[in-house]
Image (cartoon, coloured by chain):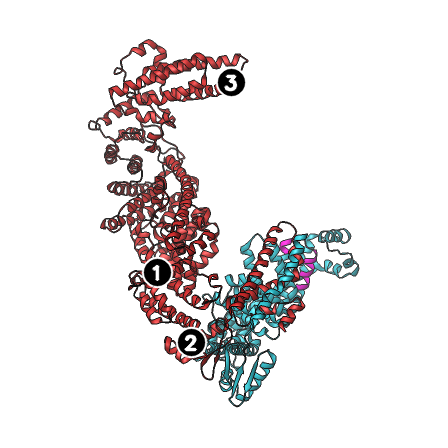
């Protein structure tokens, strides 16, 4: 589990919940969730912003769905958006006009008393109002007039300011500055009208509205390069399209003009995107040169992506499919026409009249754009639509088949970038290639080798046989393991930070999935990710959690119950598996989640086909816990420090809950099965326990179910024997190995091995008799209550000293290390004391550990005790 | 000994570590290993059992030494391989060349060597290297080139196989040189020389120096540190098994945290040697506590690395100390003995190991059992009843086992006294007073 999610995992509250009942503790956890939720959404917001910015750069201006609500923040932008919104509701308009007039009067008043603070406020208000009043891109005349007057007045004031030594007061000066800047910015947009006004103010004021064919305003400073000559054509182009594009002639020559218009209308309200797309489809048909085709395709694909960018809805299916096809065509064109390249940061070609040609000394025609962003977007859109579809329908499966073609695109994209990278002069950033390889990895790491193989084969079939990849050569892509390995090692070498960590996790996941437990574990340990995973973003943390779980499951399949339990503990012990693995939203019962948080949470969810089966996970976790806990429970029995060692709190709680039930029916779900098996195991009825465990249906989901069942049966036999010995040892003097072996159907050699192990670890106060093949239990080792209390007390005392020492060490750490030097003699003693203490605590009887005893060096007391 | 045992699966040849060891050893050090491997092929009646293998080894030897300057030997190997009587002329040429080079270096280093043998010069040397060089330069016109020539000369001598001279030269170089890199190479070189001339005392000293070098010089380069440590571990095997006094310091070195990590990550096969060293060390070690701790460590590591490395020796430890399967341990011991006898380093310790291993088995057997039949035990130990009895009596006397032999029943009866609760409480609390005092003193300061 990531550190981050651990926010509320407070030990104190945990222990209190221990004694309360089940539901109450859940309450607590949910509130804790909420806290961590808050943090999480904050983090995520940042990311979102960043990604939005970057995508802005990539595909130009995105439609601002939200900007409607954010008018005051970026009013100047929304002004243009409303250019075409010519809703003519008379009364409302009049009202607004009145308001406008009132504001203008306010400004004039301000001018009179030279109060710039007031003017600045009023001016903002005015700008806001005027947005609603724009008429076909034309601002109300009174507004223009006001603007002009204000500008004049401002210039006057500034001029005055320069000559008079007397200073304005601070608020006023600030207001003046603000207004100055705003006017500068604002007036640009209305330059034409302002000019007209200045030329002849009266004529302007009286002129009829319909009369003036106002060319469409150029919105962004970006597009300012447009000259008047362009504008005319633009306008006409705009008109024709606006009327349905029927009269329009699509010729190769006009392609760029069309594209230009479409580009400009991007991100504005009330643009008919469908219409534009169909135009572009036609344009593509007439496009002749590769340059034209590439341009059209790129615009087309981004237009399609715009369709799906509203809120949480994903882009329509048919558009996704066409976008995928078009990207394929685009990549194909780029592959064939080697002199055309699409590259980030290339210069925009401004001349619409003619296409750029290859000039002397130039190797490529560079077209600005980012293939990797397109591919990433395509990928994201698929994920989004998969999130939205009910996974149990055939629709989901149908949609999932698209992943194959997506993978092909990613693969071709990788080839394309590799080709680009061959030419060092292009300086393709390594980052793009890393991103695309990461995407490829994301699509294969959770799949079984056979599936990956099919994917690979298909994608190699798609590309011409002459092409080969340098990073993932054709010959090496046959084996999935090798493929993953090459992809990951490439990323290890060439990337850093999150991508690198993710690559590592993906590889570990894949290894764990394919039963390479030790490799996976070693990688996990050497990566040191558990220490710094909390610094990564949430999706990486989720990947980390998934990997952890997969490693745990792998350990279980290997029969390493202890390791499996240990690994799964963090995730499954928290009771929030769903959330930690992003496989479902937790229901927040006691805390409200803001819609924003909920949306983010939903976005993070993994599509169903990537899920790790939660029920199976729980089943594995509980079974492992049972195998470890039941003997432990039997061992600790009734001694006073029972509460000391708890392996799995979740399991204990469930067991207690189960035991409290007055009537237990036949087991229904996995949990019931494991609980009843636990009960049987605790009573020494291992056969019953095995039966319960075996009748859990979900084992069928594991590969090689039979071998896992046999493994479990074996484990249950052994643990059953241990539990039996722990539980019933006090009631026997001797016990024949033969009997035990018959009782648990184990080899007598195995039985003696188990018993020997227990004796040697001082878990059992007994000895074997070789002659009669019996276990002889030693008597008189059970402690009286007073004795065991004394032991506990002495334990606590030494723990106290230890804590004190540690505290002091901690505090004197910075300064001289005097303390540790001084007690160099005591050091050995301390070590010894600790060792002895631990040994005793665990065994609760039996001779003290030899190592602990021998390490005593100091003091006559020590010698005396040793005798 | 035959190259293959009847039960082919566990033939000692399967556990031959030579290919694994070789990359970490120096050319000159592999040679004795190959010699040994060849020696293994010769039967009691001095006939070579496996012609093909023998030839392979000769070829390996030739390939190994081709790059060195031991021209005479290489030439004779070549002859042996090709069945020629006279070595080809190129070897004579090369020999000539080597000799001329040697002479050249001899001249170049002659002066400085002479100087360093003069008492008055040596007495003027201080611990400061820069000052020394300054002094020699001023008074005796020694240049830095001459010092470096010492190094080159040493290198050539080593390559020719005259390790003693090489060691001497490198030692002098190290005294004078200020070039850190070369000094560390020279230290490695000296270590190799000392190992090859079997002067273990010196080798131990050099070993310590190399270790310090690795710790200090390579602090910023963990990978190089790992590689160097790996080599050092391999080189240290020579003194470890050939010089008794070296055993404890080297074991200590191996068990220090950085080295045990190196062994675990980079060369788990060293575990075999480590295990044997620890097991045979019992009884010999002065400090029983350390020995026990090492044993515990080795058990832990063997368990951890079981998935990566297994051979009869580690399997023996696993069976005995982790699974407590005495029969399995017994059978592994038999295989382990064979493996030991075919291992260059361990061949001399095979008997010792078997003996110690038996002790070990018996010890843990006794810990667990309350009554053991003598007959059974003697069968298990591979001794006859009388010998077994004697053996046990000795054992009871040596180790502080609380056991008695019941002659009538033919059993050994073990007595395991339960530890008293009072003693436990005393044990746990006895450090408390002293520790509190120390703590108090520390706080008061």
Q: Which residues are magenta?
A: B167-182
Q: Is A415 displayed left or right of B291 in the figure?
A: left
Q: Is A797 displayed left or right of A17 in the figure?
A: right
Q: Colour of chain A?
A: red
Q: CA distance from mark 2 to mark 1?
A: 28 Å
Could you tell me which quadrant the C terminus of chain A lies in? bottom right
Q: Which residue is mark 2?
A: A751
Does B132 appear in magenta?
Answer: no
Please give the name of the residue rendered at 42% of the width and 75% of the height, measured from the top-left corner: A750
Residue A232 location, quadrant: top left
* Numbered label attached to residue A169: 3
Q: Earlier in the sequence, mark 2 or mark 3?
A: 3
Q: CA distance from mark 1 to mark 3?
A: 74 Å
Residue A259 in the image, given as x and y percentages of width and height: 29, 31
Residue A804 in the image, given as x and y percentages of width and height: 59, 55
Q: State whether residue B20 is above or below residue B112.
A: below
Q: State whether residue A76 is above or below residue A305.
A: above
Please, which chain is the residue tagged with disc 3 on? A
């Amino acid at each position: 589990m990531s550190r981050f999610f651990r926010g509320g995992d407070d030990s104190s509250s945990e222990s209190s919940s221990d004694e309360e009942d089940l539901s109450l503790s859940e309450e607590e956890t949910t509130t804790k969730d909420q806290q961590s939720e808050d943090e999480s959404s904050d983090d995520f917001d940042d990311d979102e912003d960043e990604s939005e910015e970057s995508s802005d750069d990539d595909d130009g201006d995105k439609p601002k769905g939200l900007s409607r609500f954010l008018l005051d923040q970026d009013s100047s932008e929304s002004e243009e958006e409303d250019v075409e919104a010519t809703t003519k509701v008379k009364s409302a308009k009049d009202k607004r006009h009145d308001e406008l007039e009132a504001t203008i009067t306010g400004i004039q008043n301000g001018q009179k008393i030279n109060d710039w603070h007031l003017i600045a406020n009023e001016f903002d208000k005015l700008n806001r109002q005027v947005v609603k009043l724009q008429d076909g891109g034309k601002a109300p005349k009174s507004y223009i007039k006001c603007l002009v007057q204000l500008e004049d007045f401002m210039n006057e004031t500034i001029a005055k300011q320069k000559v008079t030594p007397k200073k304005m007061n601070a608020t006023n000066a600030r207001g003046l500055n603000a207004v100055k800047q705003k006017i500068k910015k604002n007036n640009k947009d209305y330059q034409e009208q302002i000019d007209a006004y200045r030329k002849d103010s009266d004529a302007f004021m009286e002129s009829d509205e319909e009369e003036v064919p106002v060319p469409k305003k150029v919105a962004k400073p970006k597009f300012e390069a447009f000259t008047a000559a362009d504008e005319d054509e633009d306008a006409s182009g705009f008109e024709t399209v606006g009327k349905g594009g029927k009269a329009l002639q699509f010729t190769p020559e006009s392609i760029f003009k069309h594209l230009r218009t479409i580009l400009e209308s991007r991100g504005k309200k009330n643009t008919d995107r469908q219409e534009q797309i169909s135009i572009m489809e036609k344009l593509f048909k007439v496009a002749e040169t590769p340059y034209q085709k590439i341009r059209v395709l790129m615009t087309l694909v981004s237009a399609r992506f715009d369709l799906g960018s509203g809120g949480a809805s994903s882009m329509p299916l048919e558009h996704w499919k066409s976008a995928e096809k078009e990207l394929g065509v685009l990549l194909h064109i780029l592959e064939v026409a080697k002199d055309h390249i699409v590259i980030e940061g290339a210069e925009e070609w401004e001349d619409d009249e003619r296409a750029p040609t290859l000039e002397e000394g130039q190797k490529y025609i560079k077209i600005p754009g980012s293939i990797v962003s397109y591919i990433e977007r395509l990928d994201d859109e698929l994920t989004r639509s998969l999130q939205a579809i009910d996974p149990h329908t055939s629709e989901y499966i149908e949609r999932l088949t698209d992943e194959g073609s997506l993978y092909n695109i990613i693969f071709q994209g990788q080839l394309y970038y590799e080709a680009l990278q061959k030419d060092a002069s292009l300086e393709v950033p390594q980052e793009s290639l890393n991103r695309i390889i990461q995407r490829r990895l994301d699509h294969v790491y959770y799949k079984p080798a056979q599936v990956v193989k099919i994917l690979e084969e298909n994608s190699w079939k798609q590309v011409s046989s002459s092409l080969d990849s340098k990073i993932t050569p054709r010959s090496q892509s046959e084996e999935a393991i090798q493929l993953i390995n090459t992809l990951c090692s490439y990323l290890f070498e060439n990337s850093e930070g999150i991508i690198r960590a993710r690559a590592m996790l993906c590889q570990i996941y894949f290894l764990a999935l394919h039963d390479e437990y030790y490799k996976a574990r070693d990688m996990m340990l050497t990566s040191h990710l558990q220490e710094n995973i909390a610094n990564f973003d949430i999706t990486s943390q989720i990947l980390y959690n998934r990997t952890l779980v997969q490693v745990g499951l792998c350990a279980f399949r290997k029969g390493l119950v202890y390791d499996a339990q240990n690994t799964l503990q963090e995730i499954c012990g928290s009771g929030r598996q769903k959330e930690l693995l992003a496989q479902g939203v937790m229901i927040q019962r006691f805390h409200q989640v803001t819609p924003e948080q909920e949306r983010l949470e939903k976005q993070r969810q993994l599509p169903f086909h990537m899920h790790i089966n939660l029920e199976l996970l729980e089943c594995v976790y509980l079974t492992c816990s049972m195998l470890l806990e039941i003997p432990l429970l039997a061992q600790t029995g009734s001694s006073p420090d029972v509460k000391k060692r708890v392996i799995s709190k979740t399991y204990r709680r469930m067991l207690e809950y189960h035991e409290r039930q007055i009537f237990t029916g036949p087991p229904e779900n996995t949990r019931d099965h494991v609980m009843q098996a636990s009960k049987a195991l605790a009573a020494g009825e291992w056969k019953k326990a095995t039966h319960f465990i075996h009748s859990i249906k979900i084992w069928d989901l594991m590969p090689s179910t039979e071998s896992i069942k046999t493994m479990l049966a074996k484990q249950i036999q052994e643990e059953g024997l241990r539990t039996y010995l722990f539980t019933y040892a006090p009631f026997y003097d001797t016990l024949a190995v033969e009997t035990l072996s018959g009782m648990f159907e184990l080899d007598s050699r195995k039985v003696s091995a188990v018993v020997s192990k227990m004796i040697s670890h001082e878990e059992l106060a007994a000895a074997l008799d070789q002659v009669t093949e019996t276990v002889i239990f030693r008597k008189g080792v059970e402690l009286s209550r007073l004795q065991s209390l004394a032991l506990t007390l002495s334990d606590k005392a030494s723990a106290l000293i230890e804590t004190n020492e540690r505290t002091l060490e901690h505090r004197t750490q910075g300064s001289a290390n005097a303390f540790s030097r001084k007690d160099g003699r005591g050091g050995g003693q301390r070590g010894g004391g600790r060792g002895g203490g631990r040994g005793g605590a665990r065994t609760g009887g039996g001779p003290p550990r030899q190592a602990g005893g021998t390490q005593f060096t100091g003091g006559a007391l020590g010698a005396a005790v040793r005798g | 000994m035959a190259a293959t045992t009847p039960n082919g699966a566990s033939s000692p040849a399967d556990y031959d570590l030579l290919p694994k060891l070789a990359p970490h050893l120096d050319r000159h050090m592999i040679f004795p290993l190959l010699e040994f491997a060849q020696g293994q092929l010769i039967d009691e009646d001095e006939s070579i059992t496996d012609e093909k293998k023998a030839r392979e080894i000769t070829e390996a030897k030739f390939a190994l030494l081709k790059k060195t300057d031991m021209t005479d030997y290489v030439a004779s190997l070549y002859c042996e391989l090709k069945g020629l009587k006279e070595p080809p002329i190129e070897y004579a040429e090369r020999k000539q060349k080597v000799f001329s080079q040697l002479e050249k270096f001899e001249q170049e280093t002659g002066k400085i060597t002479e100087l360093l043998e003069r008492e008055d010069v040596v007495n003027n040397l201080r611990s400061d290297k820069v000052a020394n060089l300054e002094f020699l330069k001023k008074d005796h016109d020694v240049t830095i080139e001459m010092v470096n020539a010492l190094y080159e000369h040493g290198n050539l001598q080593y390559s020719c196989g005259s390790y003693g001279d090489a060691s001497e030269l490198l030692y002098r170089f190290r005294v004078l040189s200020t070039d850190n890199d070369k000094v560390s190479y020279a230290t490695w070189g000296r270590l190799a020389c000392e190992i090859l001339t079997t002067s273990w005392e010196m080798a131990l000293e050099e070993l310590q120096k190399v270790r310090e070098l690795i710790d200090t010089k390579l602090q910023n380069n963990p990978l190089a540190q790992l590689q160097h440590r790996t080599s050092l571990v391999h080189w240290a095997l020579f003194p470890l098994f050939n010089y008794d006094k070296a055993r404890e310091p080297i074991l200590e070195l191996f068990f220090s945290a950085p080295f045990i990590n190196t062994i675990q990550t980079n060369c788990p096969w060293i575990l075999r040697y480590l295990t044997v060293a620890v097991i045979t060390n019992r009884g010999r070690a002065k400090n029983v506590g350390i020995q026990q701790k090492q044993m515990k460590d080795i058990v832990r590591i063997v368990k951890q690395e079981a998935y990566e490395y297994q051979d009869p020796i580690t399997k023996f430890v696993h069976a005995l100390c982790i699974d407590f399967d005495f029969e399995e341990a017994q059978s592994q011991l038999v295989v382990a003995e064979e493996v030991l006898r075919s291992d260059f380093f361990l061949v001399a310790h095979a008997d010792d190991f078997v003996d110690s291993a038996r002790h070990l088995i018996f010890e843990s057997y006794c810990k667990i059992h309350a009554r053991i039949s003598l007959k059974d035990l003697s069968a298990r130990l591979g001794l006859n009843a009388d010998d077994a009895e004697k053996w046990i009596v000795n054992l009871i006397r040596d180790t502080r086992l609380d056991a008695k032999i019941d002659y009538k029943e033919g059993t050994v009866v073990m007595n395991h006294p339960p530890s008293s609760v009072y003693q436990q409480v005393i044990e746990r609390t006895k450090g408390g007073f002293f520790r509190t005092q120390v703590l108090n003193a520390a706080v008061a300061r």
